[in-house]
């Protein structure tokens, strides 16, 4: 199982081999298209002259220079300055807690609840983002500790089309987009 999004093949390859890139992509996945967010780590790595994202390097990077990396046209995110701070905070946390090894966040967890708890601790990750990431790990990367589906909430459901965890082709991407549109319309109708 792997992640295969409609983005540059090299960007998909990076996401599939680099836990730091995958965690960064999920962090960027707000207020921009899913494809743009998940392309972001590849863009950052290329602009830094790297083939991968290194949590140690990003954590130690000069904040103004790192903001410029995300701000160069086309910007990595709709809010490149604030996202640069968030990416650096995430990498600083990974360095302090996991010696920069993003995969250590999920490697060896005993349960879905433990995995969800570890993800909830990550800067920029709230409950929903953490649940989506649990589903992403379970459905696309085979990280399935006992109780992972329950920890992922409705994002862990089989045959759902709620998030990036459910995207396997253009058809499933369209279904996820439609689901998100329905959610927004329902929220707008309530408000």
Image (cartoon, helix red, strand yellow):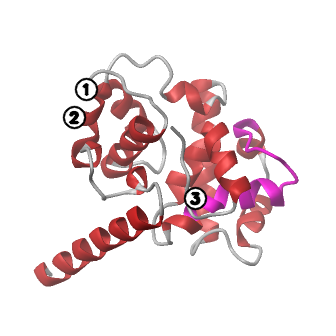
Which one is earlier in the sequence, the residue at label 2 or at label 3?
3
Is 50 part of what is drawn in magenta?
Answer: yes
User: Is 172 placed above or below 133 here?
Assistant: below
Which structural element holds mark 3?
Answer: helix
User: Is 82 placed above or below 163 here?
Assistant: below
Quadrant in the picture for residue 176: bottom left
Q: Residue at x 39, y 35 (%)?
A: 138
Residue position for label 3 = 38
Q: Are marks 1 and 3 in contact (CB under 8 Å)?
A: no
How far apart marks 1 and 3 lie (CA) works out to 26 Å
Which one is earlier in the sequence, the residue at label 1 or at label 3?
3
Residue position for label 2 = 150
Q: Which residues are magenta?
A: 37-56
Quadrant in the picture for residue 59: top right
Q: Residue at x 60, y 37 (%)?
A: 19
Q: Are marks 1 and 2 in contact (CB under 8 Å)?
A: yes
Q: Are marks 2 and 3 in contact (CB under 8 Å)?
A: no
- Label at residue 147: 1
Q: Is residue 184 left or right of residue 117?
A: left
Mark 1: few/some/many CA within 10 Å (<14, 14-19, 20+): some
Magenta portion: prevailing SS class: helix
Position in image of residue 146 (x %, y %): 29, 21
Instruction: Tell me if I can see residue 63 in this picture.
Output: no
How far apart marks 2 and 3 lie (CA) works out to 25 Å
């Amino acid at each position: 199982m792997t992640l295969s999004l409609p983005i540059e093949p090299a960007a998909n390859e990076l996401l599939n081999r680099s836990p730091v890139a995958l965690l960064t992509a999920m962090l960027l996945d707000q207020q921009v298209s899913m494809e743009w967010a998940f392309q972001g780590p590849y863009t950052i790595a290329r602009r830094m002259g790297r083939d991968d994202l290194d949590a140690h390097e990003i954590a130690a990077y000069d904040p103004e220079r790192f903001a410029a990396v995300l701000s160069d046209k086309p910007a990595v995110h709709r809010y490149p300055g604030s996202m640069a701070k968030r990416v650096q905070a995430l990498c600083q946390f990974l360095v302090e807690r996991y010696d920069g090894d993003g995969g250590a966040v999920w490697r060896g967890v005993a349960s879905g609840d433990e995995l969800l708890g570890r993800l909830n601790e990550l800067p920029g990750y709230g409950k929903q983002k953490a649940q989506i990431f649990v589903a992403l790990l379970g459905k696309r990367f085979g990280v399935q500790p006992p109780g992972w589906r329950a920890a992922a909430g409705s994002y862990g459901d089989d045959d759902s089309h709620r998030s990036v965890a459910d995207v396997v082709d253009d058809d499933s991407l369209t279904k996820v987009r439609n689901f998100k549109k329905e959610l927004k319309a329902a929220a707008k109708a309530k408000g």
